[in-house]
Image (cartoon, grey):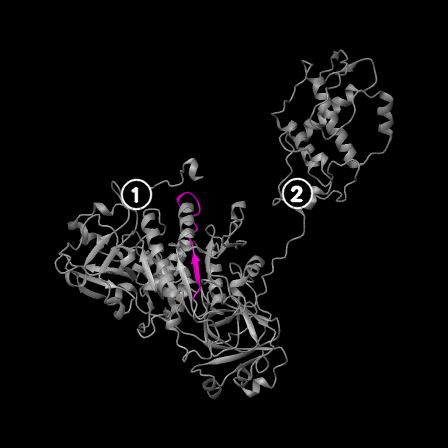
Amino acid sequence: MLSAIAARKARLQQVHAPGPENYSEKGKLSPKVPPPPPPPKSSTKRRHNHQDGANLSSKKARKNTPKSQSEKKHDFVKGVSNVSSQFTSQDDVIFLDHSDDDSDMSINLDQDDAVSGRPECPPEPSQHGGRKAWSPSCPVVDSSDDASDTSEQPCTDFFSSHNRPLTNTEPEVLSTYRPVREQNIFQLSLDEGSALGLNGPAVALVLSPSATASFVGTFRLRVLRGSISLLGTTVQPSQVLHHVFAPCSSPVPVIQALVACGESSSSLHDIPARILGIVDEGDVVILLQELRTGIERLGRVVRTFEGIFDQTNLEGLPDILEGIHLVTHAPRGMRAFQLPPSWEAAFSTSPFSPAGEDASLPRPHVLLIRGQKNSGKSTFARTLTNRLCSRYRRVAFLECDLGQSEFTPGGMVALNLVEHLVFGPPFTHPTLPHQAHYVGANNPRSSPSHYLRAIQSLVETYRLDLQFATSLVDIEDDAEDDRIADVIPLVVNTMGWTKGLGANLARRIEELVQPTDIFSFDTSPSNEAEPGGPRVHTLEPITSSRRFTPSDHRTLSLLSYFHAVFPNPTHSAPLRQTTASLWSTDLPLCAQPPYELTSRLALDRIVLTGAGSEDVVRTELVRVLAGALVALVSGPSPSEGDEEELYTPGSPPPDPASSTCLGLALVRGVSSDGSKLQLLTPVPPETLMNARILVMGELGLPVWGWMDFRSVGGGGAGADVPFLRWGRSTGAGSERRRVRRNIMRRAQM
C-alpha cells in the first residue's frame, strides 16, 4: 500500500520536472499533458479550500517556505488527487480506481484529519494539538452530504459534547440524622415503656430542627415533643401510635422534624426524665416501636416483592430496632416521597383551614380528583385524606378506580370510612367497606351502565347516612379529641381512563358527585373553573416507579387481601373503620382450610357477568366456578312463593340500590353435582353469614396465589398446582385471543 503511494509521488515529480518532454515508466516519449481545467465549485464545502490555477512562481515561493507537518500531509494528499486525472488519459499507465485499497487509504487519511485534534476552524487554532478527538465509546462526526456541515460549528462543539465532565452520580441523601447512643437515641426500659403504654422494645429519637430520618420496614410511631412532617402530613404530639409501613417498592417516607414550640405540659410529662434533661430548645422527640404483623413475609407469597421491607444501610449503620432499617442514602431504584409545590399550594385552600372557619357551609366538602393514569392520583388522594383526618374525625372515601383501588381489592367501587392516618401503600391497609358494589373488571368498558348505577347508589348512601352524622357522635369517648365530628367530608378518586368512553363516564361522575373542589392533573385550557362551579386546582404529576407495573401492584393488593386477618366489626359503633391489622402468611391459599356450604341452603342466586358469560349453560356451571374469584353480595331475600333457579344464564347483576358487596372469595372446590362449595375468604364469619349471592366477573386469582411457597422454589414450573397448567398449550384455540381496542372514531379522539 505504501509502495503504490510512493510510486504515485514519483510520477508526480516526473510530470513537474523541468524539460520539454516527460518520460513514462517504460522509457518512451509521451506528449506533455496540459493541466486540467479547474473543477467547478461544489455546493458542499470541502475541507481543503486551496485555489487552483496558481502560477509557478507562487508555487515555488510556497515550497521555499517551511511547512508544518499537517500542511505537508494536506499537500501530499492534494497532489495525489490532482494527478490521478492526468494518469487516466495515458494508455501505458495502470490506473487504480476508487474501489482499490490505495484510494481508500487516501480517503481514510483525509477523514482521520477531519476527526483528529485539528478540526476545520481556520480562524481559530485548535487547543487540543495532535490529540485524537474520538474513542471507541464516542461516535465520530458524520461528514456525509446529508449531515450538517461541521465547518460552520465552533471548534469546541465536538469536544464539549463528547468530553464534558461526568455528572455527579452520588445517591440522594434521605437522612441527615445519625444515631448516637445515649445522645440522640435512647433504648427505653420496661418501666419507661409501660409508663408510655408500650409492651415491647422501643426507642426514643431526638431530632434537631429540620433534621430528616428515613426508615424502611414496619414500625409504630408516636410524637412526644414538637411535630413532624410525614408523607405530606403534619403529625402533632398525641397518645396515638401510628402504624407506618415503608416498603422500598413505593416512595420511602421521610420524617422531617419541625420546630418544637408551644407544647402542652402533658406531652412533656410523657418523656422520661433522662431524655428530657438533654433535649435542647426546638428539638423534636419521637418514639419508635417494633411492629410485627406478618405483612413483612408477604414477599414469600408474591416473589416479585420479596425483600421489600429489608434494606442494607450504605454507611454500615446498625438497625434502629429489629425490622426498622435506617436509610441514609437512596440506592438505585429507590426514591423518597416529595411533595410538589403545586400540591402544597392546593392544601392551603379552605378545606384545610383551621376548624370553625367553614361551619356555616351548606354542605360538607366534596373533593374530586381526576387525571390520566400514572400521574399520582392515588398518592394525592391518600395525602388528601390524611390532611382531612387531621381536621375531621372521619373522612369518607369513594373509590371509583377499579384497577387501582386504595382500601379494597380491585374490581369494585366502594365507599369507605377513614378514621386514622394512613401511612403506607394500598396493600398495607385492606379495609372492609361501608358499602360497595362489584363490577368484576379492571375497567368499566364491558358494563358502563352498571358502573354508573353503582356510583350513584354510593353517592346517595353518603348523602343520606354519612354527610351529617350528628346522631352517631359519642362525645364521652372522644372528649379530648378537638377535631370536627358532626361533618364527614368526601374524597372521590376517579379512574385514569380519560379518552372516549372514559371521558364520558368521568363527566357523568362529576355530575353525580357535584364536587365543591376539583383537583386536576390536566393542564388543558378546558381545565379552568366555570363561574358558579367548583373550584379547580391544577396539580403537577409525579413520576411513578418503573420497577413494578400496575399489574404487579394489583396482584400484591389482591393477595394481601386474601391473607389479611380482619377484626370482628362492632355492631355498637356502625361508623367505624375496619382495617386489617394482621396477615396470615404461614400457609399458602392451597393449604388453608376453607368454608364449606350447601349451595341450595346458603345461596339464593349465582350470577355470572362479563363478556361471554351469557353463553354458560347450567351443566357447565360447575366447571366455571371451580377456582373462580367471586364476590359475596348481600341482597334482599326472595319471597316464600317465588322459587327461582339458583343460576339463570344471562341474568343481570344485583341491583346496587338494594344490595351491597361484603368482600371477595375464592371457590376452592365444587362437588361434581354442584351441591357443595368450598370458599376461601378473609371476611369475618359475622359478616359472611349475610352473603346470599355469588357474583363472578372477569377477574381471576393471580398465578402467585396458586403457588405453594413452602416448597423449594415456591412451586415453579412443573409443580402440581390445581387449576394451573404450565407451559405452552397446543391445539386450536389455545392461543390467547388478541383484541384491538385502540381504534376509535373521530368523535372519540
Magenta-span inclusion, residue 496: yes
Q: On the image, which quarter does residue 478 sit in?
A: bottom left
Q: From the viewer's perspective, is residue 27 above or below residue 295?
A: above
Residue located at (32% from left, 53% from top): 439
Frontmost residue, 91 versus 584? 584
Of the numbered discs 2 and 1, the one sitting upstream in the chain is: 2
Q: Give the x, y percent position of residue 535.
A: 52, 55
10 Å neighbourhood of mark 1: few (<14), some, or many (≥20)?
A: few
Q: What stretch is highlighted in magenta?
A: 488-501
Q: Give the residue type that dot 1 points to.
A: Glu
Q: Is mark 2 on a helix, strand or loop?
A: loop
Quadrant that contains the C terminus: top left
10 Å neighbourhood of mark 2: few (<14), some, or many (≥20)?
A: some
Q: In this view, does 67 lie to the left or right of 479?
A: right
Q: Can residue 107 be seen in this view?
A: yes
Quadrant that contains the N terminus: top right
Q: Is mark 1 on a helix, strand or loop?
A: loop
Q: Give the x, y percent position of residue 685.
A: 25, 70
Number of marks in the rendered image: 2
Q: In this view, does 260 lie to the left or right of 363?
A: right
Q: From the viewer's perspective, is residue 7 above or below residue 91?
A: below
Q: From the viewer's perspective, is residue 113 above or below residue 397?
A: above
Q: Which label number is shown at residue 134?
A: 2
Q: Give the residue type that dot 2 points to.
A: Trp
Q: Which label number is shown at residue 735?
A: 1
Magenta-span inclusion, residue 514: no
Frontmost residue, 38 versus 647? 647
Residue located at (29% from left, 60% from top): 660
Q: Is residue 284 left or right of residue 417?
A: right
